[in-house]
Amino acid sequence: MLLYQMHELGRAWMAPMTYWADAGAKMFGATGSWLSGVPGASRVAAGYELLYRIGKDYEKPQFGIDSIEIDGTEYPVVEREVLVKPFCRLLRFKRYADEADDLVQLRDDPPVLVVAPLSGHHATLLRDTVRTLMRDHKVYVTDWVDARMVPLSDGPFHLDDYIEYVQEFIREIGAENLHVISVCQPTVPVLAAVSLMAGRGETTPRSLVMMGGPIDTRQNPTQVNNLAVQKPMWWFETNLIHHVPANYPGSGRRVYPGFLQHTGFVAMNPERHFQSHWDFYTDLVKGDLDDAESHRRFYDEYNAVLDMPAEYYLDTVRIVFQEHRLPKGTWDVRGERVRPDAIKGTALLSIEGELDDISGQGQTRAAHTLCTGIPERDRHHLTVEGAGHYGIFSGRRWRTQVYPQVRDFIAKYAKG
């Protein structure tokens, strides 16, 4: 199938027009430009910038966390690679205080591993999550690699490989003091990873925080869940899986392309996105630069998508959404049965948004019915009123309602 190649050809064809639109926006909108003074210049500049942003490429954003304020004092932050795998980098955001002209570690706070979703957007979507957690924790993050950038020689990547990555990261950091936070999609492989470790007698993390994930999608299925069960597997493989073109390092690799995923995201709420772009245009015309900048920041992140390995994506559709192997107790990984009831020394907190239209209420909470080896006193649940999917891990509700409870939960089970 040539859809990916046609997309790249169209992108190359659009590039000159995009550059032209960017130049036009600057000529008619820049302070000091004589064109900015002609009648209607603000409308022309706004139209050009809207055209530019619709047609431009959106590269992976940076986390951009250079400092963190703690107790009224600003401290520098250094982003470090702890472990590099073909399909993922384990990052550490290290906080420092400046003492005696030497950078020393700030505090002995509990370590937290944030497992970011591999479901279209980059891990930078959790920037607000990470920044907030850094006030009271040593934060590690899984930074998944765009599959089109991974050479074929590095082999395939299955859901089983994802689980092994999570286990390796936990061991690298040290499970005995670790708290793991999984956001959305990774709740399933994280629960599987810890279950397998427990079944082998390995040390498991001190706690698990599972946020808005598809543990059991039979509970209050959403539009996303229904799509996965209404189509047979051959439909997904035939219509959504394509080969990476020759202009990328992963040439020939089978992937679920990011541009197709983005089309699906937009198709879920087309009216909202159309209105958002119209509001952006009118904000530029009116000179409301703060709201216009908010639009740019949101869509710089929202429009930056990555390709997912085909094997991993198809495994997830089949195992998680169609066959429900985790809640049914029928999931084997590399010949080992996934048994969440084997987890005993790990506390559990599940978090759901009242208005979540991606993972319906009850889907994450289902982890409690599976993790029967964890005493009831160590199992907790939080439903965030008025919150949608993103509100439980990003934005005002996350910072003011959710995070204080996550912080206190981790503190309760942190090793003294």
Image: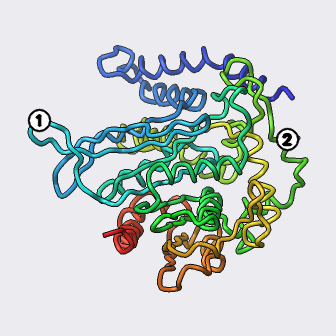
Which amino acid type corresponds to the residue marked 1 in the rendered image? Asp
Q: Nearer the viewer, mark 2 or mark 1?
A: 1
Dot 1 crowding, Cα within 10 Å, few <14, some 14–19, many 20+: few
The reply to whether residue 105 is in sight is: yes
Quadrant of the rendered structure where residue 337 is?
bottom right
Q: Which residue is mark 2?
A: 239
Q: Position of residue 322 (x, y in %)?
A: 82, 62
The outermost residue toward the bottom is 376
Examine the rendered structure and indicate whether residue 311 appears above or below residue 171. above
Q: Nearer the viewer, residue 170 or 1?
A: 170
Which amino acid type corresponds to the residue marked 2 in the rendered image? Asn
- Residue located at (52% from left, 70% from top): 351
Quadrant for the C terminus in the image: bottom left
Q: Which circle marks residue 101 in the picture?
A: 1
Question: Left or right of 199: which side holds 277?
Answer: left
- Residue located at (77% from left, 23% from top): 5
Question: Left or right of 237: which side holds 45?
Answer: left
